[in-house]
Image: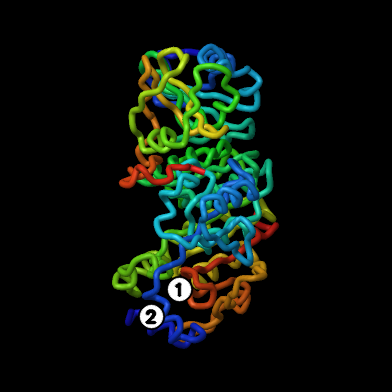
Amino acid sequence: MEWLERYRDMIPDFEGFREVQSQALPSTCRINTLKIDKRSLLDRFCESGIDYQSFAWYPLGLKLNLEGPGKLVENLLGYIHIQEELSMLPPLLLDPQPGELILDLCASPGSKTCQISQMMKNQGRVIANEPSLGRVAPLRSNCDRLGVMNVAITRYDGRRFPSRPVQFDRVLVDAPCSSEGRERRGPGVLCKSSSKRSMDLHRLQVDLLRSAIRLVKPGGIVVYSTCTYAPEENELVVEKVLDLARLEEISIPGLAACPGITGWSGKDLNRELCKTARYYPHLNDTGGFFVARLVKKQEHL
Amino acid sequence: MSPDSSRSRNIFEPLDCSFVADLWGERFGIPPSAFSGYVFFRKANSVWAANKSILPRLSYEAIGMRIMNLKDRPWKPTTSALQLFGQYATKNLIHLDSTDARAFMEGRTLAVESDAKSGYVVVFYGGEVLGCGLYSRGVLTSQIPKERRLASAEHSSEDLSLR
């Protein structure tokens, strides 16, 4: 927890931020419209006496007032997917369209992959890349359970994903990170945090984001996200690619966000970084998250 | 189909739709039209289905959904595939009541009277497909994958409704 002190000047209501760390996250799920429509799912929940509340900002996201939602038959049959609230945000910002070719560069366990598939109505193609063989199994399992048919899984090192034969319409980089924003899912991640760890991840994240911009078509969208607060893994990563892509402002009605920071550790950062968004756990009763929406510049053909 | 070549090489080989439609039609009475929107591949002893769309020339770990295992006889449909195509089945299907449906979802073996032929069956509850079962002489064995099973109910006499 002491590690969080470095964010005291960055995070509004810092005491509230510290206090919420020890409170468990609410159970949340996404309705999987590949298998059931929202009305039918909500009718089932009402019949079963399951107490739910829709998110203010996303109609397919639900807060569930129960423990162990993973064992609900609706989850086992793939009608819902247990997914942290803010994990549903990057696919919305990616805004994939049916028929497009999408790359999810760091896909496992596939919550966002399957949400992208659902947004595309099982049409077009999602390439879900996951280099680790051990992490392919949960990715496949989720795709199968959720009735996903438009996903194909690859196992490339994301930094060296082949540039040919095609360019993607959109690319999601939900990057490996120090996961500080996941402390509420179970304490432990913060004690592993260090500047060295964040800087090691920073190098990998920059390479992955550069790779994503290389792989997307000119004018195409790249969404970069992490579940950490460390600026080294967020704004300082995005800043490295602003010669290749421009930032678009992020605004999600119903979800309280803070603008990305434009200074850290006594140094000024690119002012455009205020267009990225930070989400803190005490402001929305969620985990912590960072997202950036980038558009590849036309001149880099 | 060229089974020998795909068995020896760990790659996805395109498979004619009629290969899948014939087998599923024969066992489950599913019309060929149910499969017309998909493309099929064979990799070693498994058959995969995906939507019809662009598939860049890359090295794949998986394409769409694994729908059948051809290793043993009879061939085995996956629960995921039955949840997609099983709704069109006209034979070798079994409808369960809520008590049996719960036990089936727990992965248990049940005594069930059915006119289904011995082999893999589509298991329904309340009009929706639960998944794959193996039926033989009044005994239905759940084939629900372990990670998709309900936890065993300790209070089995309580309300077992799945809905």
Identify the image quadrant of residue B36.
Answer: top right
Up the image or down, B120 lies above or below A66; here it is above
Q: Residue furthest front?
A: B157
Q: Chain of mark 1?
A: A
Quarter of the image containing the N terminus of chain A?
bottom left
User: Does residue B135 appear in this view?
Assistant: yes
Identify the image quadrant of residue B20.
Answer: top right
Q: How is the image coloured?
A: rainbow
Identify the image quadrant of residue A151.
Answer: top right
Q: Nearer the viewer, residue A137 or A103?
A: A137
Instruction: Locate residue A269, reporting x and y percent.
Output: 54, 79
Disc 1 designates what residue? A229
Q: Amino acid at mark 2?
A: Leu
Instruction: Locate residue B115, reporting x and y percent.
Output: 47, 14
Q: Are marks 1 and 2 on the same chain?
A: yes
Query: Counting other residues with Cα less than 10 Å from the Cα at mark 1, is it few (<14), some (14-19), or many (20 or more)?
Result: many
Residue at point 41% right, 49% down? A71
Mark 1 and mark 2 in contact? Answer it, CB < 8 Å. Answer: yes
In the image, which disc is placed on residue A4? 2
Residue at point 64% right, 67% down? A247
Up the image or down, A181 lies above or below A268; here it is above
Q: Secondary structure at mark 2?
A: helix
